[in-house]
Image (cartoon, rainbow, N blue to C red):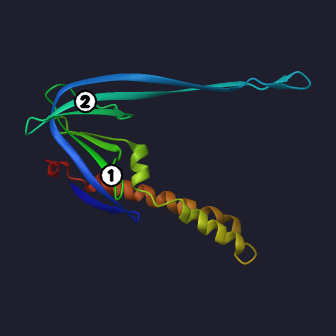
Amino acid sequence: MRTINTCNKEYELYWVTGQVAESGKNMETRVHGGGGGGYGNGYTAPVRINSTTVVHDQLFVVDGSGKEHAFQLQDFNVACRDGNEITVLWAIRRGKKTGPYFVVHNRTTSQTYYQEKELGKIFSYSLLYPFGLSILCLFLWNILPFAFLWLIAPFVIWFILRKKEISRFKTSTDFASFN
């Protein structure tokens, strides 16, 4: 276990490193649609249909002590086969009992797979900060030049800081140290 502090939050990192004993993969397609309704004068709204594919990976990993671990991963699309050595990382926020898997590193192929949605949650400040600053700007609307820009600036800064924290984690993490 390792502790990281990021964006005013503390997480404990856990991991398992071992050999893949078995792996499986399946895909789920989710279809979403809407529209098609009509109102007066014969107008009909266009129908919109979107689909997303979610990849599910199932990995059975045997660690150095011979203990087998099962991982059910979503949206990673890990390329591995039996015998590959991998490391799976998950983060648990201080005060919580569980947390998300967010990195799988295949040591055999030197490929790293990130769950971007979970990285975004871990490495971003609370959205209360930009909302609070935007509300403050509303009160200063008549004083600030280009006040409308000040309403969106906190969200732009929040997004930039988030990207910077994620990038810092990705470039500074040495997976060889997770044994």
Where residue 170 appears, x then y in whole percent?
Answer: 31, 51
Amino acid type assigned to the residue bearing label 2 in the image: Leu
Residue of label 2: 59
Give whichever of 54, 95 is nearer the camera. 95
Can residue 93 be seen here? The reply is: yes
- 44 left or right of 105 in image: right
Mark 2: few, some, or many residues within 10 Å (few <14, many ≥20)? Answer: many
Classify 12 as above or below 17: below
- For the point 22% across and 46% down, the residue is 15
Give whichever of 17, 68 is nearer the camera. 68
Residue of label 1: 92
- For the point 25% across and 29% down, the residue is 59
Where residue 50 appears, x then y in whole percent?
Answer: 59, 27
Q: How far apart are marks 2 and 1 (CA)?
A: 20 Å
Q: Which badge, 2 or 1, comes first in the chain's sequence?
A: 2
- For the point 13% across and 47% down, the residue is 179
Where residue 94 appears, x then y in whole percent?
Answer: 34, 59
- 158 left or right of 100 in image: right
Total numbered labels placed on residues in the image: 2
Which element is circle 1 on?
Answer: strand
